[in-house]
Image: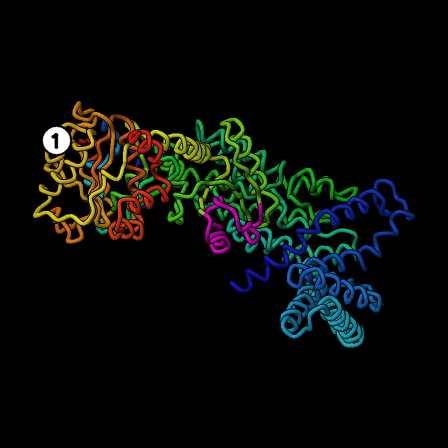
Amino acid sequence: MICKKVAIKDERGLHLRPATLFACIAQKFDADILVQYRGKTVGGKSAIGLLQLEVTKGGEILIYIQGREQESAMKALLEFICTN
Amino acid sequence: MKLQRIGRFLSTIVFQNISGLIALGMIRVFFSPSGWWPNPHIYQVVNPMLQYFIPVLFAYSGGRIIGGKRGGVISSFVTIAMAAGNNTSYTLILPAMAIGPLIGYLIAKIDKWLENRIPVGFELLIYNMAAGLIGVCFAIFGLIFVNPLINKGVELIFTGDTLLTKSGLLPLVALIIEPSKVLFFNNVINHGILEPLGIQQTKEFGKSIFFLLESNPGPGFGLLLAYFVRLKGKKKAAVKSSLVIQVLGGIHEVYFPYALMNPWVIIPLIFGGMAGDLIFYLLKAGLVATPSPGSLFIILMMAPKGNFMAVIAGFLLSALVSFLGSLYVLSQGKVVEELMTQPHQQDMLIQPVENSHQAMPIKKIIFACDAGYGSSAMGAAMLRKKFKQANLGIPVNHASVDEIPRDADLVITQIQLTQRASKMAPHAEHLSISSFDEDTFYEDLIARLKSQKDNNERKEVANEMELTEDHILLDMEAKDKWEAIEQIGYALVARGNVERQYIEEMKQREQVVSTYLGNGVAIPHGIDVNSPRVKKPGIAIAQYPKGINFGNGKTAYLLIALAGQGPQHLSVLSELAEMIESRQKVNQLLFSKSPEEMIRLIHDSGLFYFEEIAEANRS
């Protein structure tokens, strides 16, 4: 299991488009992915779940990944958040 | 697993009666012939207490837990009958811990058997008669047949542990005690095993070393001290408070996580425990009753006159050995460096066990630990204090893992106990902590509960999204998603929510990334949240029973078009996602036959309360 904390930069928070893309990237990897924000935890492979977190701009989310491809999954997700 | 459960059960029996044992211990310390103020008149109560009071107490507790009040009463009856007929010097303390549950079990079984066989109106009479009969039978049976057997058995155990005490091998039990303690078996070992043996021994010699073996805070204290020396900054402060809580508060649980962080420290812990036990043995130290909780204060209070120095020496030496050993281990391992360089690693403390109930509002929080008196009470008190500061009015209670109330919404346990806790309370949400002094845990929890509070307020913002019967399109058909977006977009235009150009913005947004969300639902909306094309926020919903291809092999059957403004966009999305997560809800929306039904369905899911606005618009 690896875990990283990262802040959402998007002006409008984690809204539909970034949530969909995040889930899309997450689905590609063979690993369990959880995202936590303000004590609430959802699966990282579902945009429906991610939207319920209501992450606003600057909100720090925790990403937990466990599984065979955990390293590459974390790298891809962090890259996505940092460039978006 | 079975053995574990039995051990835990026995420890519960003793744990519930600790205050009585401590009272008896005080009488010993003060008034025994070797005590501070020898007084035979007062001291004479000790013997009947040991002969009758404690066995009956244990039998009652055990019987009541399993067989209800009547189980407790009859267990006591049988125990006192057997005690009265017992003319040896052994007490029935150990047998009572078996008699209680046994009789309780019988009563429970018979009650169940009788349940459907009693004529109405005779319940009280027959239940009591049956229980009474069991009492009489077992009292006679016990007096005649079991008593001699028990005496033999107790004699055997007793010679066994006397042999162990005298042989000098006693310090070796640290090999078992220290590792099991760290794995949260501390209560089982202390109250389930060592304590009954100790009480028995105390009756013979006036004190027992068994009370010191598990409760000695020395090894844990040394370990925490080593962490205190090695760590820096915020972590250091956390260890400091753990130190005080452990050695003076007697809540040993606070050091277990530190031991689990670097399993090698178990070796110094064992050596620390052995060193202490050896000193206790050589100096013939002992206590007159269990110090519970294992605080230095209570330990010294329970030490008979003339034993202080021996007890303190054992404590100090075990702390010293464990401290030096742990310090060595910590300077070898990488754990400390990691702790110091990667503070974020610690954020992993909250681990989701189950998250399907996240949407439920939290009204009752339970802190649970093995026994339900020590660390859970402390954790609950800490949380209550923080809630008060944060102005949150949610009640926080503490309980034993086995007795978590059914209506608890959120249960907090130490990580090793979470699995057990979630079995006990499957409907609650479970959070784990690995250490009680972890501030980030409490901060995150408070932030979340506050957002729960804010959420209710934010719901009212969503109210401003207009949804009327004109916003609902039933049984639609379209050749592709662009046509569908045009159709649903027009519903918003027709109601004056948006200007015509907004439809183009919706298409642009669709081109960037598909707005397909999941469960057959897509949420088309404009590309710019602050679009000047939005005149008044609103929502349109359309059914497409034949499905619309949204790319990537995804088919949407329900379209929900949003015309939102600025900051409320995110919370509207979040609420919609909550609804769409339920397949059942989506299906209901998809197959509903009238706009009124659709609005009612959305209304019922507690998302948007549009009625008043809709009404205002009509008039």
Question: In the visual, does B113 lie left or right of B414?
Answer: right
Q: Position of residue B371 (x, y in %)?
A: 59, 49
* Residue B604 seen in render: yes
The structure residue drawn at horizontal position 70% and vertical position 49%, both measured from the top left corner, is: B18
The structure residue drawn at horizontal position 57% and vertical position 52%, both measured from the top left corner, is: B403
Q: Position of residue B560 (x, y in %)?
A: 22, 41
Callout 1: chain: B
In magenta segment, residue B361? no
Label 1, secondary structure: give it: helix
Location of residue B66 (image quadrant): bottom right
Magenta extent: B399-428
Nearest to the observer: residue B479 or residue B334: B479
Q: Which residue is mark 1?
A: B505
Identity of the amino acid at label 1? Glu
Question: In the visual, does B403 lie left or right of B110?
Answer: left
Number of numbered discs on residues:
1
In magenta segment, residue B418? yes
